[in-house]
Image (cartoon, rainbow, N blue to C red):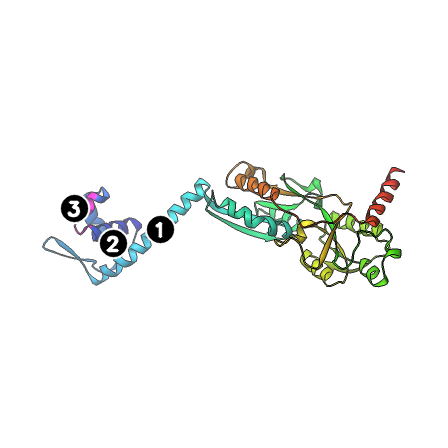
Amino acid sequence: MTLHQLRIFCAVVQAATMTRAGKQLGLAQPTLSQQLSKLEESVGTRLFDRTGGQMTLTEAGQFLARQAQMILNDFDSVEAGLREFSSGHRGIIRLAGLNSIIRVLMPEAIARLAETFAEMEFDIHEVAPAEALELLYGRSVNIGLIAANSVAQSSLSFIQIPVMSDPYVFAVPSHLKLSAIGDPGRDLPPPDRKILNSSIQFNFGTQHTQTVAQWYQQVLPHHRQIAQCRSYEVALSMVRAGLGVCLIPALAAHDRNGGPSGIDLYATDQPDRQMVALVPAQYCRVDPYKTFLHILQETAGTVRLPKILPMPPFIRQAAARRDERIAG
């Protein structure tokens, strides 16, 4: 059985006569007769009773008529879908990146892309920066969303497209008020001082991990690392429970209700995390990737970060001491 034979069969069934079916298909009647005979030969049974110039479906013909129409409809749908792939209006965008930026930006970005490319699909991997790079190099994804300083620049062979700046904030339990604290050892009672000196840090296997560890040493020289995490959600849950404090990107604390409950966020002296999209050069110039990257930047520009309180005096003082050492 071939699709060509099935189309002829369905046309004859709907037209009721070979002559009318021939006109619809633009085929001569002998050709139709030949193809129908081959179809009957391939299925091993008669599909039509031919009496008095009339063609009546046999029981086998009635069965095939029902099935053939569904087969042809499905095939037409496949053809249409493939045409959308070839025209760039349908396809799969595969991306990998940090949970925080994917969670905040992707829902709106996908919805906006659908206004132009309604049939696009997404394959999303929430991974650490090193894993995102591996997936890019392995051609398993088309786009990587990571922090620019999380990988060695010399190892990159992709176009870096800026997405947004993400400030680092100091997350503490909301009952721990730091706005007027210049010397934690003097200004805080022992229970609060213990919480402040209990750090929750991250091990993403990136260069920035060491920078954060040095920051804790400068700002809280008496701190003790009580936990090491690999997700910001876990770290924030521990802060909310009053177990300790952590330095995190503001996006990690983003909440559509305005901010994480039970947690206050303070500004720090750490440079903003620069979020970028890593893209193989060929994808920057073709749709739907080009349009999606533009939408991603636009969406990032509308993000409202959670409330960030002014930098506590003891963090500002630690930054000043560091700057003096560098200048000296």
Q: Residue furthest left?
A: 52
Pointer 2 residue: 39
Give the Cα distance between marks 2 and 3: 18 Å
Determine whether 286 is above or below 250 in the image. Answer: above
Could you tell me residue 159's position as x and y percent? 62, 38
Which amino acid lies under the numbered mark 1 shown in the image of this protein?
Phe
Could you tell me residue 275's position as x and y percent? 66, 44
Which amino acid lies under the numbered mark 2 shown in the image of this protein?
Leu
From the viewer's perspective, tell me whether residue 82 is left or right of residue 288. Answer: left
Name the residue located 72 percent from the left edge and 61 percent from the top edge: 240
Decide whether residue 17 is among the magenta residues. yes
Res 52 seen here:
yes
Q: Which quadrant, please, contains the C terminus?
A: top right
Which amino acid lies under the numbered mark 3 shown in the image of this protein?
Thr
Give the Cα distance between marks 1 and 2: 19 Å
Comparing 41 with 215, the one in front is: 215
Pointer 3 residue: 19
Q: Upstream in the sequence, badge 1 or badge 2?
A: 2
